């Protein structure tokens, strides 16, 4: 059984895989393997273990004649052509539920950093420009007592809402389905109209999967629905936001700022965003704690072990 791992992963996960078959590991970063490189890498694979940044498209799946299973260590699986896999009867697994709390920590840290202009202030100090305290230096926005609009009240959205309550924030949420648990536990208020949520929120945090209907969910029109003092946070998937429109909206003062951990054409970032001081940009690290990333890697390996052993898959993609 040949298991191809597209990028290096935690040793704990590799140990599981090596006990189950012959393991080939792709190159370390940088650069990230392209779709064509992944396709060549998995040509003779029985099982593919992919990472969220590594695309396994239809051509790659159809070209891997021996392929029997695909596993990803991500909580999302938009990098895999699931339809192409299903056509061949190839099961796909993911790793849900593991990174929720860590990602919520990251999202809230990004919210705080953007609201309080921490990135700007640190760059100012490191550049040797700090000459002493003044009352108006880097004044930002209060987070406590503000209104947070959460778009997508799934596991991560709920975890962010719990953190918001610790800051005495009013929590609004929009989702395709209501979450009675969030309403009962946290007093979160459901808003059925996304535009209304955008208009009422001081901060908007995105927690939706990348689907056809969520691509460019936040476009120029939706950004104009937000308050001029509002801040947009995205730790979900980059293409959920139209980056060109966002850069223009921030530049023109349509909204006050943004905090991003994911990008539309990752790892590339819209150049106009890089020029804006009131945008905080992180390199996809919201789930990047050592413990969580190791657990994600091990869970994907455990799905592969279950498959090889003929046991039910732990986390099959529906």
Image: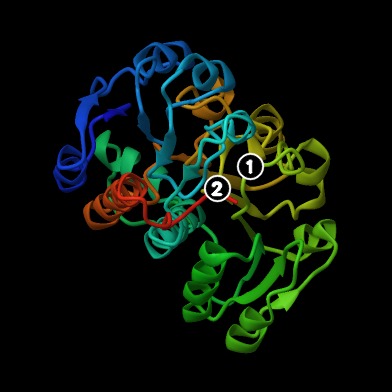
Residue of label 2: 236
Q: Position of residue 55 (x, y in %)?
A: 48, 25
Q: Are marks 1 and 2 in contact (CB under 8 Å)?
A: yes
Q: Which mark is residue 193?
A: none
The part of the image, by quadrant, that contains residue 31 is top left
Quarter of the picture holding the N terminus: top left
In the image: residue 35, left or right of residue 233 = left
Q: Residue at x 61, y 48 (%)?
A: 209
Q: Which mark is residue 210?
A: 1
Colouring scheme, one of rainbow, by chain, secondary structure, one colour = rainbow
For image coordinates 27% across by 46% down, the residue present is 131
Q: Relative to 115, say whether 257 is above or below.
A: above
Select label 1 or label 2 by which is in front.
1
Q: Secondary structure at mark 1?
A: loop
Q: Element type at marker 2? A: loop
> Separation of disc 1 and disc 2 at Cα?
8 Å
x, y percentage for residue 282?
A: 41, 40
- At x 19%, y 46%, the residue is 16
Residue 19 versus residue 209: which sits nearer the camera?
19
């Amino acid at each position: 059984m040949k298991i191809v791992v597209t990028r290096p992963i935690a040793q704990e996960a590799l140990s599981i895989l090596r006990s189950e078959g012959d393991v080939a590991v792709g190159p370390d970063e940088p650069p990230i393997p392209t779709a064509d490189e992944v396709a060549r890498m998995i040509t003779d694979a029985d099982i593919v273990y992919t990472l969220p940044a590594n695309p396994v498209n239809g051509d790659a799946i159809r070209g891997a004649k021996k392929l029997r299973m695909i596993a990803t260590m991500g909580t999302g699986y938009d990098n895999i052509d699931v339809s192409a896999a299903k056509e061949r009867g190839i099961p796909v697994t993911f790793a849900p539920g593991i990174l929720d709390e860590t990602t919520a920590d990251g999202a809230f840290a990004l919210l705080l950093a953007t609201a309080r202009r921490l990135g700007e202030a640190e760059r100012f100090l490191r550049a040797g420009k700090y000459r002493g305290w003044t009352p108006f230096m880097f004044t930002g926005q209060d987070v406590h007592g503000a209104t947070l609009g959460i778009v997508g009240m799934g596991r991560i959205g709920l975890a962010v809402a719990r953190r918001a309550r610790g800051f005495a924030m009013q929590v609004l949420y929009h989702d395709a389905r209501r979450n009675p648990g969030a309403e009962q536990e946290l007093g979160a208020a459901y808003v059925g109209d996304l535009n209304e949520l955008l208009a009422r929120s001081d901060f908007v945090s995105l927690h939706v999967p990348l689907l056809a209907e969520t691509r460019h969910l936040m476009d120029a029109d939706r950004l104009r629905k937000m308050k001029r003092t509002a801040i947009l946070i995205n730790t979900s998937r980059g293409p959920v936001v139209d980056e060109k429109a966002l850069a223009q909206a921030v530049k023109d003062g349509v909204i006050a700022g943004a905090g991003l951990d994911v990008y539309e054409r990752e790892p590339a970032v819209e150049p106009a965003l890089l020029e804006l001081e009131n945008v905080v940009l992180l390199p996809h690290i919201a789930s990047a704690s050592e413990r969580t990333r190791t657990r994600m890697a091990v869970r994907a390996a455990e799905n592969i072990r279950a498959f090889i052993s003929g046991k039910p898959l732990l986390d099959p993609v529906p």
